Amino acid sequence: MGPMRSFFARPGLVVFAPLLLATGCGAGAGDAGGTVVDSAGVAVVTTSSDAGNLPRWQVGESLLTVGTEDTPLVRVVGAARTPDGGVAVGTADTHEILWFDARGALTARAGGEGGGPEEYQWLQTVIGLPGDTVAAFDLMSGRANLHGSDGSILRTYSIEAPSRGFGRQPPFARLDDGTFVVRTEHTDDPYPGHQAYTVHLVRRADGQTLDTLASVPGREGYTVACGPDDSAVCTVGIAYGPATSVAARGSRVAVSGRGDEIRVLDDGVLTRILRLGEPAVAVGPDEVQAYVDSLAASAEAAGFDPARVRLLRERQSGAPSGTRMPRFVDLAIDGAGRIWAARGDVAGPRWDVFSAEGFRVATVALPPRSRIHQIDDDRILISRTDALDVETVELRPIIR
């Protein structure tokens, strides 16, 4: 079964978003082979989907784990390694940034819920910057704070919408040139009915928009009139709809529009398009039914009452669905410029690793329910939730 897509919220609507579980089955050095075609100066790299001849990288046991009973972590929104061998972690539950040393001991904390200059109303993202500085972004107040390793605020600036028609969103990555990359999206399609969104990646510095790096097809939504008098609009997800993912590091940006290919930009210029050679996996009635059943089961587990679960089934069953499973549902870039892509069209799912030149060189197994925050040559920083819903941040070795 392919990835779980989410309901998308509109103001005044309470929606349910199932969790995408990222696992993997893994791979070492080598590649699957492939072809390169030049298209107006852009290298189109096509490789095989068959992972049988690829090395399997493994993720070893944790070298550092934070998120204990003394300092629990709930809803991690970002994590980054620090120069002293520790980690900085942002949590949406307490709206705090926490610093841990290489032994896992808490050394500093900043933030907290509130509207003060050092507090956060909606801590949405935490990004590691060069040295020991981290950037924390509050979506509600539209404010960004740069914190030192002792938690002190070094600088503050505002997050503004890139331009008219774009929502205000915090950056998700910082490039080597000091600019931040922001993902935002919009649609001009009316409600209710079918909406197709466009994702825009823009570069910003000092709170100002510099340029647009890429615009690609984004998610799709399906809305219906709802509420006691049909005065509200409810949005349901599209089963196996487009899966747009983005990642950035160094001078490289990767984006997968609709989940079918990966577009790679270096220094703001499109240089590569990564594709798989085999046809995409088709979606049929059985896959759509399994998707609806999974949503209903997740809703029941979350405590939804039976009437609400039935309504969920009815609305989701009446919504359109995709015709093929997205190939790529999440992206990350490691310190060597390799692109890690979570697959949504294979059993698992799994992560594939593409070399800096665009060839697949490995597959990787991650622990269940993991999220990648940072990948260096031989270390990977993840957050994960175990079977008891305990959330931790872990630094693990990559074994090739």
Image (cartoon, rainbow, N blue to C red):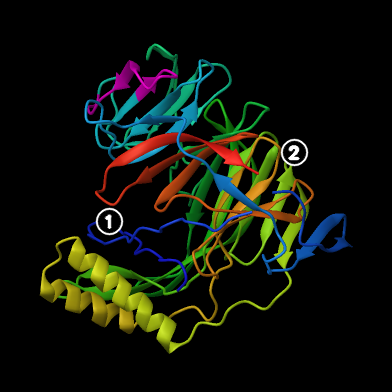
In front: label 2 or label 1:
2
Near mark 2 (Cα within 10 A), the count class, few <14, some 14-19 or many ≥20, is: some
63 in relation to 44, above or below: above
Residue at 87% over, 54% down: 41
Image quadrant where residue 91 sits: top left
Image point (76%, 62%), residue name: 32
Residue occupying the point 24% across, 49% down? 388
Is mark 2 in CB contact (under 8 Å) with mark 1?
Answer: no
105 is within the stretch colored magenta: yes
Q: Which mark is residue 267?
A: 2
* Quadrant of image for the C terminus: top right
Question: Residue 34: image x %, image y %?
Answer: 82, 64
Name the residue type under label 2. Answer: Asp
Residue 48 drawn at (x, y percent): 74, 68
Magenta-highlighted residues: 98-115
Residue 11 is tagged as 1
Query: Could you say which is closer to the camera, residue 237 or residue 374?
Result: 374
Q: Position of residue 12 (x, y in %)?
A: 22, 57
Mark sitting on residue 361: none
Q: Earlier in the sequence, mark 2 or mark 1?
A: 1
| Residue 312 coordinates in the image, percent (x, y) | 24, 75
Q: Amino acid at mark 1?
A: Pro
